[in-house]
Every structure is written in C-alpha cells, then in structure tokens.
Image (spheres, helix red, strand yellow):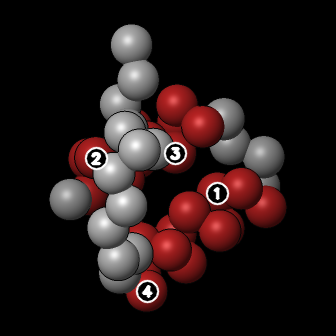
Amino acid sequence: MSLCNDTVRHPMHPLREAMLDQMRLRGHAPRTQASYVHAVS
C-alpha cells in the first residue's frame, strides 16, 4: 500500500519540500517521509 500517489501532481509547498529534502539527506525511507508529512499536514 502506498501513502502517496505519484501520478497526481500538485504544487509542493516550500516548507513541505524543504522537510522532504532534509529527510532525504538524512536517509529516511520513503515510507517514513510519507508518514511524517502526513502527521504534520
């Protein structure tokens, strides 16, 4: 089960984009990133 749908493109809020960039740099798994973004949105 995927928490995000990559086929639908939405403009990304700059803070969300920065959060995802930082999590990627720190090596968080894609599912962890999706869970964190979901928790704060």
Label 2 neighbourhood size at 10 Å, few (<14), some (14-19), many (20+)?
few
Distance from disc 1 to disc 3, alpha carbons, whole Å, reads 7 Å
Label 1 neighbourhood size at 10 Å, few (<14), some (14-19), many (20+)?
some
Q: Amino acid at mark 2?
A: His
The percent position of residue 37, horizontal first and vertical second, equals 36, 53
Q: Amino acid at mark 4?
A: Pro
Q: Which mark is residue 23?
A: 1
Q: Which residue is mark 2?
A: 38
Q: Which mark is residue 6?
A: none
Could you say whether the residue bearing mark 1 is in a helix, strand or loop?
Answer: helix
Q: Residue at x 71, y 56 (%)?
A: 24
Could you say whether the residue bearing mark 2 is in a helix, strand or loop?
Answer: helix
Q: Which residue is mark 3?
A: 33
Of mark 2 and mark 1, the one earlier in the sequence is 1
Q: Which residue is mark 4?
A: 14
Foreground pick, 36 / 8:
8
Distance from disc 4 to disc 2, alpha carbons, whole Å, reads 16 Å
Q: Residue at x 68, y 42 (%)?
A: 28
- Left or right of 40? Residue 31 is right
Distance from disc 4 to disc 1, alpha carbons, whole Å, reads 14 Å
Could you say whether the residue bearing mark 4 is in a helix, strand or loop?
Answer: helix
Pick out the residue farthest to the bottom: 14
Of mark 3 and mark 2, the one earlier in the sequence is 3
Q: Amino acid at mark 1?
A: Met
Distance from disc 2 to disc 1, alpha carbons, whole Å, reads 14 Å
Q: Are marks 4 and 1 in contact (CB under 8 Å)?
A: no
Quarter where residue 2 is shown: top left
Up/down of 39 relative to 31, above or below: below
Up/down of 10 relative to 32, above or below: below
